[in-house]
Amino acid sequence: MTTTLICSKFSALADLMRLRKQYGTALLVLPSMWVIFIAASGRPSAELVGVFLVGAFLMRSAGCVINDIADRHFDRAVARTKSRPLASGRLGLKAAFALFFILTITAFVLIVLTLNIFTIKLAVIGVLFAVVYPFVKRFSHLPQVFLGVAFGWGAVMAWAAVHETISIIAVLVFAANIFWSTAYDTIYALMDIEDDRRAGVKSTAILFGTKVYSIVALLYVAMLVTIAVAGYMAGLGLIYYAALVLVLIYALNTVSNLKASSKASNMGETAMRAFISNVWMGAVILLAVILDLNFL
């Protein structure tokens, strides 16, 4: 095997994992970080934070791989995804499955070696969510909701990792993440809505129809109200609530701008920017949690 071919294969594997696009990892890990800092009164161990960061990277990468395995035929019919490694033929199915198992096993070993038994049991459920998610779009218009379940499960695990139990605070963050993920992944689905209709792929972007922007705005409101309640139960204060107000204003403005550009030729680019902006929303909330717990 020549050096050029080896480099080509590694590049394809990196693309399959979305190695150059880590906003998905950030969106997965942020709700877990909110809960970790709340559960640990603002000062979690560096080891625990590191485990969740690395675990999120590994499981998000594994999720991307299994998603592309499941969607390889659909991806060929969508302009934005037809160049993905499996859809374009740059990588074979055996290599993709091998990468998925390596990533999943590595993540599980990391969890087994560092976390308590209760969290390990929750992690098994999390893996099942990751495997099932890519297939939801075949029979339901709610894959974005299921993504929220899969991404939000880390918040439940985070509380369990600190206290070996589950609290209402973690459940509220879990619920908030379902609203949040449904909002931002609906925005993401808007980029492919016409191709998805032709390919028979279901999504909330299609389901919500002409009311999509109003519903996404309501989902952001529901998300922020829910984590406001979680913050109240956790005893968070002014910094936290000020951040939530700012994030809500920003989110609603983002939806308004997206709606205004819905007929423009660069709507796909606008939707992608709106989607990625959720990373900054989540980061502001995390910063507010840390500041509130450590300085108020």
Image (cartoon, rainbow, N blue to C red):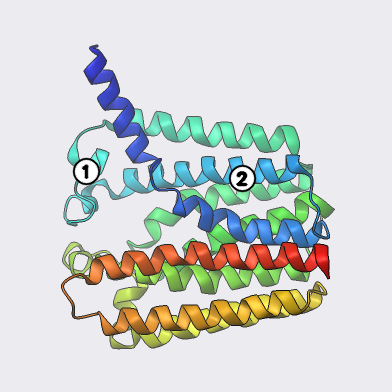
The three-letter code of the residue at mark 1 reads: Ala
In the rendered image, the quadrant that contains the N terminus is top left
Classify 10 Å Cα crowding around label 2: few (below 14), some (14-19), many (20 and above).
some
- Circle 2 residue: 53
Q: Please, what secondary structure does the residue beneath circle 2 have?
A: helix
List x then y, in percent, for residue 180. Answer: 52, 71
List x then y, in percent, for residue 263. Answer: 19, 81
Q: Residue at x 47, y 78 (%)?
A: 251
The reply to whether residue 214 is in sight is yes
State left or right for residue 119 relative to residue 67: right
Q: Earlier in the sequence, mark 2 or mark 1?
A: 2
Q: Residue at x 80, y 72 (%)?
A: 234
Quarter of the image where one finds residue 99? top left
State left or right for residue 35 relative to residue 210: right
Q: CA distance from mark 2 to mark 1?
A: 29 Å
List x then y, in percent, for residue 80. Answer: 22, 55
Q: Please, what secondary structure does the residue beneath circle 1 have?
A: helix
- Which of discs 2 and 1 lies nearer the camera? The answer is 2
In the rendered image, the quadrant that contains the C terminus is bottom right
In the rendered structure, find residue 134 and report the number of the disc placed on it: none
Q: Residue at x 68, y 68 (%)?
A: 288
Quarter of the image where one finds residue 37? bottom right
Classify 10 Å Cα crowding around label 1: few (below 14), some (14-19), many (20 and above).
many
State left or right for residue 271 relative to residue 289: left
* Residue 96 sits above or below residue 274 on the image: above
The three-letter code of the residue at mark 2 reads: Leu
- Circle 1 residue: 87
Q: Residue at x 38, y 56 (%)?
A: 135
Q: Nearer the viewer, residue 171 or 269?
A: 269
* Residue 51 sits above or below residue 173 on the image: above
List x then y, in percent, for residue 176. Answer: 60, 73
Q: Nearer the viewer, residue 287 or 81?
A: 287
